[in-house]
Image (spheres, rainbow, N blue to C red):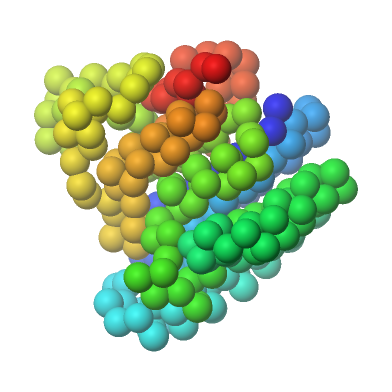
Amino acid sequence: MRIVVKVGTSTLTHETGRINIRRIENLCKVLSDIKNAGHELILVSSGAIGLGVGKLNLKQKPDDMPTKQAAAAIGQCELMYLYDKKFLEYNHIVAQILITGMDFDNETSNHNFQNTLNRLLELGVMPVINENDSIVTDEISVGDNDTLGAIVAKTAQADLLILLSDIDGLYTANPREDKDAEIIDVVFSITPEIEQLAGTKGTDLGTGGMITKIKAAEIAMDAGIDMIITNGMYPENLYRILDGEKVGTKFRGRRK
Ligand code: GLU
């Protein structure tokens, strides 16, 4: 299977903005093992701004664009340094691709991106993709990595998109406020009711939230790709997904 895994800032960092070492080590181990089992993996990783904020010891995520972009430039190095080091322990090579919304709109860039992606996969390398936050502004950015993950999955004609989040899946109500909230196992189409369940709130360091995940689901489903939201706190959930267990919320891709 060709699988795109998107990992959010909240999975990679503590609330302090500092790296969650145990989590990243565990994630890299599981992903390496899945690659060893013969699957092709593409990692869409957030965390550049979050890690930059942590490294600069800033008290909170900056609001102004230049500081955000500076934090992304600093954090992206740290992120790739970590992935390179950890995956190498399991004999896997990673490659960084930084992309912007404009690149998907431009036919030549899009084509080049696809070629690079395919070649890396043929070479057995794991592409690690993030938005090139240092050069985009709100007007021209994809904006969030949930959407980026879905566009990458569509471009790469992946079989499955997995979003590792700080929540177990989509619930019938906000589980942080309503203890009777239940997880929804499968979503077959994005109805207004589903959109309403998404609420708005993401975490402080990331940019997503459930709304962007629903938007990602729409793109993936439309391209015939299944998408699963599961909790990134437990990277072993990836094994369970591949074993066919019911994990998180599955958004079923349109069958042709
Ligand atoms: N590209 C941003 C980063 O790496 C994150 C975007 C997102 O969390 O959705 O920090």
**Residue 213 sits above or below residue 230 on the image:** below
Q: Residue at x 46, y 31 (%)?
A: 222
Q: Quadrant of residue 128?
A: bottom right
Q: Residue at x 29, y 41 (%)?
A: 210
Q: Residue furthest front?
A: 107
**Residue 58 sits above or below residue 113 on the image:** below
Closer to the camera in the image, 248 or 161: 161
Q: Residue at x 49, y 51 (%)?
A: 148
Q: Residue furthest left?
A: 178
Residue 56 appearing in the image? yes
Q: Quadrant of residue 96?
A: bottom right
Q: Residue at x 80, y 51 (%)?
A: 120
Residue 162 shown left or right of residue 188 in the figure? right
- Percent position (x, y) of residue 140? 41, 69
**Residue 124 sits above or below residue 171 on the image:** below
Residue 12 shown left or right of residue 25 in the figure? left
Image quadrant containing the C terminus: top right
Residue 27 appearing in the image? no
**Residue 27 sits above or below residue 250 on the image:** below
Image quadrant containing the N terminus: top right
Q: How many marks?
A: 0
- Percent position (x, y) of residue 143? 39, 61
- Percent position (x, y) of residue 198? 23, 37
Closer to the camera in the image, 132 or 237: 132
Q: Residue furthest bottom?
A: 66
Closer to the camera in the image, 205 or 200: 200
Q: Quadrant of residue 33?
A: top right
- Percent position (x, y) of residue 92? 80, 49
